[in-house]
Image (tube, rainbow, N blue to C red):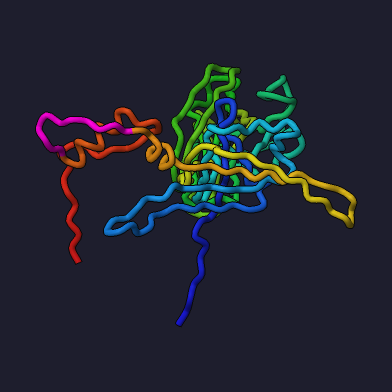
Amino acid sequence: MTVIERPLFGKVDIQVFESGSWVTYLSDATGVSIRRGGVRDGLGVKTDVGILSFTLKDRQDPLGGGTFVPGMKVRVLAGEYVAEEDVTKLSQGFESSMGSWGAVNGTVARSSALAVAHTGTWAAAVTSSGTLRSGIRMTVSGLTVGRSYTFSAWFMRPNANSSAAKVGIVGGTQGATITPATSTYGQATVTFTATSASHGLDLSSLPTAAGVVSYWDDLQLIEHITEVAYPIFTGQIVDVASAYPFDKSRGTSRSMVTVTASDAVLVHTSTPRYGVQIAEGFETFESRINRLSSSAQAPIEVPPVGAPREVYAF
């Protein structure tokens, strides 16, 4: 029998809401624990308050300028990624070389004549060999299957003998065509989802004859890393405690700050309730939880009144 062991979570992050944004603390944490659940209480189940505890090394020391105070929001995220960012996978300005770009239906060379570059000094000058679409092409590797990418480039035509410029993926997604005014750069873009670890990038325009020159510059490929993390704990800080263990071998000490947070169960269970008289004499669970949520001291998702009941079949 083959046993495959996989991690429960791809990545985990601890974040605290500070000054309007979430700040990560996982890199300084030396231990993280989450305790929650229910315990048997007679014939029913009593819901326990969820507790998060983590220890930070040399960060957020309350005696050294730490900013953590009770009531601050905290969350633990888990998933494949815990951040959303754009990463530049390719940036080509032809300032030093053509790199791996090769010509299609024509020839290509770097040019600095007549200030043809979009930025810098040099641009790629493509000379057509006929009336077929001509341009440049290369293969980029190191892509992640299923991830989104945006490829862009700036195109300039010195006269009206070239038009309908575009960028695209060889054998795949093509961007919209552009025809900027003569001697003016316009940006062509395409967004695609990688289906393999490598794809061919293509830039082309439509010439009216052989010998037509057009220019490309400032090519860029951006990788979009989308957040797919989900919270496994949300709550508020209830305690911050620090200790300063001494390392005898080095003669130094460090701060170890233990942060404790509780989830909304603590808020809900400690909210005073003094009873209410219902005109009908009784109420459904959905009606009761909706009524109680209107005065809840923490956010709570409630089922709609009259929601269909779920039946489990085995």
As for residue 277 lying within the magenta part, the answer is: yes
Of the 4 image quadrants, the one containing the N terminus is bottom left
Q: Is residue 18 above or below residue 48?
A: above
| Left/right of residue 199 with respect to residue 45 in the rendered view | right
In this view, the residue in front, 22 or 235, is 235
Q: Residue at x 31, y 33 (%)?
A: 273
Dividing the picture into quarters, in which one does residue 39 lie? bottom left
In this view, the residue in front, 109 or 287, is 287
As for residue 179 lying within the magenta part, the answer is: no
Q: Is residue 134 visible?
A: no
Q: Residue at x 20, y 59 (%)?
A: 312
Residues in magenta?
273-283
- Farthest residue in the left direction? 280
Q: Residue at x 50, y 28 (%)?
A: 208
Of the 4 image quadrants, the one containing the C terminus is bottom left
In this view, the residue in front, 278 or 89, is 278
| Left/right of residue 15 with respect to residue 234 in the rendered view | right
Name the spot of residue 144 as percent of width and height, x first: 53, 51
Name the spot of residue 170 as percent of width and height, x first: 49, 46
- The overriding secondary structure of the stretch rendered in magenta is loop
- Farthest residue in the bottom direction? 1
Q: Is residue 298 above or below residue 138?
A: above
Q: Residue at x 52, y 45 (%)?
A: 76
Dividing the picture into quarters, in which one does residue 313 lie? bottom left
